[in-house]
Amino acid sequence: MPDIGRILIGLGLLIVIFGLFVSFFGRLPGDIVIKKENFTLYIPIATSILLSVILSIVFYLFSKFF
């Protein structure tokens, strides 16, 4: 059961890193924003691609060393 504690701490750190990432890189070039009078549509395409690449690297390294 001690491994569950480490997993929860790791997931918590990933959530914190994700929150910091989203706050700093929320509006990259390539993200689509459509604003109308009472409507705003935000499609984060570039942010999603960058986040996917970073998470792929993190999970690869995580599986390699643990």
Image (cartoon, grey):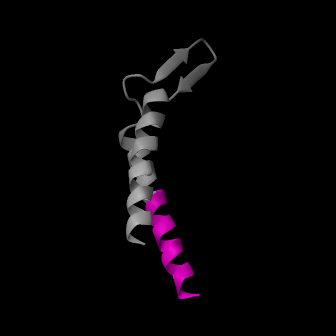
Residue 1 vertical placement versus 47 (above, below): below
Q: Residue at x 48, y 36 (%)?
A: 48
Q: From the image, give the main secondary structure of the stretch colored magenta.
A: helix
Q: Of residues 56 and 7, which is closer to you in this image?
A: 56
Q: Position of residue 49 (x, y in %)?
A: 45, 35
Residue 52 vertical placement versus 12 (above, below): above
Q: Check the image and name the residue furthest to the bottom.
A: 1
The residue range painted magenta reads: 1-15
Q: Position of residue 46 (x, y in %)?
A: 43, 29
**Marker count (numbered):** 0
Q: Residue at x 44, y 50 (%)?
A: 55
Q: Position of residue 23 (x, y in %)?
A: 41, 43
Q: Residue at x 59, y 87 (%)?
A: 1
Determine whether, in the image, residue 64 is placed left or right of residue 2.
left
Q: Check the image and name the residue furthest to the right.
A: 38
| Residue 46 shown in magenta | no
| Residue 3 shown in magenta | yes
Q: Position of residue 60 (x, y in %)?
A: 42, 57
Q: Check the image and name the residue furthest to the top.
A: 37
Q: Which quadrant of the figure has residue 64?
A: bottom left
Residue 15 vertical placement versus 66 (above, below): above
Residue 45 vertical placement versus 53 (above, below): above
**Which quadrant: the C terminus?**
bottom left
Q: Of residues 45 and 36, which is closer to you in this image?
A: 45
